[in-house]
Image (cartoon, helix red, strand yellow):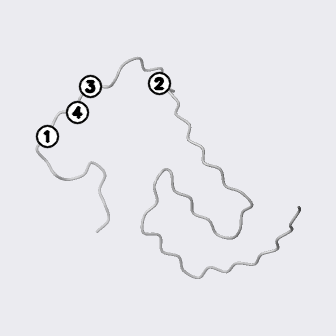
Amino acid sequence: MHFTVHQSINIYMIKIGSITNSSVLQIGSSGSIQAQSDIYNTGEFTKPAEEAEATGEIAPIVPLAP
């Protein structure tokens, strides 16, 4: 069965609380969304990384907006 969908979508404001690596934000319709997860070892690592040292600071490494 074949469907043709014509859409007109106007978004004046959108607020997204959070989105993660496995999230899907969909606006409009889709016939099918299939999950896919790929893991690549682009650095050709052969063993786990060393444990990080605790610095005693609580502040995040990347500054966050208030």
Cα distance in 3D space between marks 1 and 4: 9 Å
Q: Position of residue 14 (x, y in %)?
A: 53, 76
Tag of residue 50: 3
Left/right placement of residue 49 relative to residue 33 reads: left
Amino acid found under the numbered disc labelled 1: Thr
Q: Which residue is mark 4?
A: 52
Query: Are discs 2 and 3 less than 8 Å apart at CB?
Result: no
Q: Position of residue 61 (x, y in %)?
A: 27, 48
Q: Position of residue 58 (x, y in %)?
A: 16, 51
Left/right placement of residue 41 relative to residue 66 reads: right
Cα distance in 3D space between marks 2 and 4: 19 Å
State whether residue 24 is above or below residue 29.
above
Mark 2 vs 3, N-terminal side: 2
Query: What crowding class fits label 4: few (fewer than 14 Cα within 10 Å), some (14-19), or many (20 or more)?
Result: few
Q: Residue at x 62, y 65 (%)?
A: 26
Mark 3 vs 1, N-terminal side: 3
Q: Quadrant of residue 37?
A: top right
Query: What crowding class fits label 3: few (fewer than 14 Cα within 10 Å), some (14-19), or many (20 or more)?
Result: few
Cα distance in 3D space between marks 3 and 1: 15 Å
Mark 2 vs 4, N-terminal side: 2
Q: Which residue is mark 2?
A: 43
Query: What crowding class fits label 2: few (fewer than 14 Cα within 10 Å), some (14-19), or many (20 or more)?
Result: few
Query: Are discs 3 and 4 less than 8 Å apart at CB?
Result: yes
